[in-house]
């Protein structure tokens, strides 16, 4: 039995109290808030489970086991840990005294089998928006997916990536590997935390330097969280158009401000106006998504960046917007995606790039 198989069996032994949740393909997250409180997310809804660990010691043993197999440390001077289960599921552990009890959060790894059409079936977007987004990707427009935690940014990025042509070489950069692109010519790079002795640390920024030497046609970043935003923005404006990424923000304008702030967190002394100018120049399209009270996730807006106004403030124009119309009898959100009437400034590129023949539902937006 190899090391991975041993780890898998060991994990199933120590996490036996929550195995029903681990084995349920519809459960996307498991949140263990101490030995006697377990929540899970299923179909977008958080639910308190009746499952629990017999005592705190067994839960701590599970956390320690995960740490040992992943060559991490937990306890003492190490209050938290990020690791991976054998199936690729992401795990975060935090222990007392930083938490009142051992807390383990598991984001389950689920092989992506859906695309933009699947999101249309789920009601996350309309078929017209799906066609529009396909063209945006094929036109190599720099695209940012913006939303809060749990809104489905990674799922949207996976679905959006299906529009990337098979002929392109793609480099994927992530803190923790979650993306699963369908294209064969894809290189996956993953940041590495330092080992217990402090060696072996590989940051997102390190991987950016590597990626630019790998002749990428397209750079896809799972999420920008720190100073690597500057590397991404500069790559967008220096010959690597068509980049895709996600960011935590509540509106397209907030997404731009967030990227600007993250650029300032790099080790490069950058004046604010320079960071703002570069972000405004790099961004083309922002896809805003949100999770509603019924657990569904929807695109709430698609906006084009129009640069800076005379007061050096970000300008955005919504192309599509979601109009909520209340709740139905089952408590589900009703609404529809509508076109605002704004015509993207890059509409004429559809015809000149040879994509005019595939435009069906977006005739009113693109000039062909």
Image: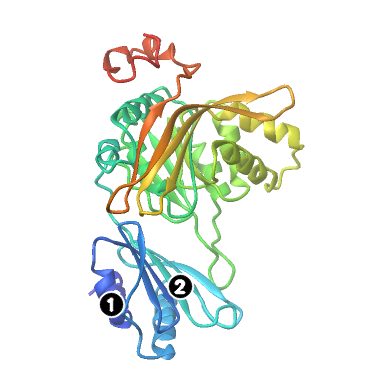
Q: Residue at x 47, y 76 (%)?
A: 103
Q: Is residue 200 above or below residue 65?
A: above
Q: Residue furthest front?
A: 329
Percent position (x, y) of residue 202?
54, 56
Q: Is residue 350 left or right of residue 360?
A: right
Q: Which mark is residue 12?
A: 1
Using the numbered discs, state the Cα–Cα distance from disc 2 to disc 1 in whole angstroms. 18 Å
Q: Is residue 112 left or right of residue 308?
A: left
Percent position (x, y) of residue 67?
44, 76
Disc 2 crowd rating (10 Å Cα; few below 14, some 14-19, many 20+) is few
The quarter of the displayed image where residue 63 is located: bottom left
| Total numbered labels placed on residues in the image | 2
Q: Nearer the viewer, mark 2 or mark 1?
A: 1
Disc 1 crowd rating (10 Å Cα; few below 14, some 14-19, many 20+) is some
| First-in-chain label (2 vs 1) | 1
Q: Is residue 203 above or below residue 141?
A: below
Q: Quadrant of the N terminus?
A: bottom left
Q: Quadrant of the C terminus?
A: top left
Q: For this rendering, which residue is in front, 301 or 348?
A: 301
Task: Say whether residue 183 is visible.
Answer: no
Percent position (x, y) of residue 54?
35, 90
Q: Residue at x 68, y 33 (%)?
A: 276
Q: Is residue 91 above or below residue 99?
A: above
For mark 2, give the secondary structure. Answer: loop
For mark 1, give the secondary structure. Answer: helix
Percent position (x, y) of residue 83?
44, 67
Q: Which mark is residue 273?
A: none
Q: Residue at x 61, y 44 (%)?
A: 258
The quarter of the displayed image where residue 133 is located: top left
Task: Say whether residue 170 is visible.
Answer: yes
Q: For this rendering, which residue is in front, 220 or 42?
A: 42
Residue under label 2: 71
């Amino acid at each position: 039995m190899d090391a991975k198989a041993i780890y898998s069996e060991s994990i199933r032994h120590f996490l036996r109290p929550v195995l029903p949740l681990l084995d349920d393909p519809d459960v996307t997250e498991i949140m263990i808030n101490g030995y006697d409180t377990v929540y899970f997310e299923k179909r977008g809804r958080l639910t308190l489970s009746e499952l629990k660990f017999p005592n705190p010691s067994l839960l701590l043993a599970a956390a320690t086991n995960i740490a040992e197999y992943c060559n991490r440390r937990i306890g003492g001077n190490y209050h938290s840990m990020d690791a991976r289960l054998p199936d690729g599921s992401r795990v975060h552990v935090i222990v007392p005294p930083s938490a009142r009890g051992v807390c383990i959060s598991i984001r389950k790894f689920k092989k992506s089998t859906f695309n933009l059409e699947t999101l249309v079936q789920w009601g996350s977007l309309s078929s017209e928006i799906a066609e529009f987004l396909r063209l945006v990707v094929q036109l190599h427009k720099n695209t940012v997916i913006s939303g809060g935690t749990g809104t489905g940014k990674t799922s949207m990025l996976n679905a959006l990536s299906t529009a990337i042509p098979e002929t392109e070489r793609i480099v994927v950069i992530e803190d923790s590997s979650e993306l699963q692109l369908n294209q064969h010519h894809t290189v996956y790079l993953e940041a590495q935390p330092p080992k217990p002795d402090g060696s072996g640390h590989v940051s997102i920024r390190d991987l950016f330097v590597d990626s630019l030497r790998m002749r990428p046609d397209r750079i896809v970043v799972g999420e920008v969280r720190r100073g690597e935003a500057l590397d991404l923005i500069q790559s967008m404006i220096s010959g690597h158009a068509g980049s895709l990424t996600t960011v935590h923000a509540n509106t397209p304008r907030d997404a731009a401000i967030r990227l600007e702030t993250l650029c300032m967190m790099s080790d490069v002394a950058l004046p604010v106006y320079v960071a703002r100018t570069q972000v405004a120049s790099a961004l083309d399209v922002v896809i805003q998504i949100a999770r509603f009270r019924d657990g569904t996730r929807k695109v709430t807006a698609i906006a084009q960046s129009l640069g800076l106004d005379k007061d050096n403030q970000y300008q955005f124009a919504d192309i599509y917007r979601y109009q909520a119309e209340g709740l139905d009898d089952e408590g589900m959100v009703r609404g529809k995606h509508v076109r605002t009437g704004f015509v993207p400034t890059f509409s004429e590129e559809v015809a000149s790039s040879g994509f005019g023949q595939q435009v069906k539902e977006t005739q009113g937006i693109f000039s062909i």
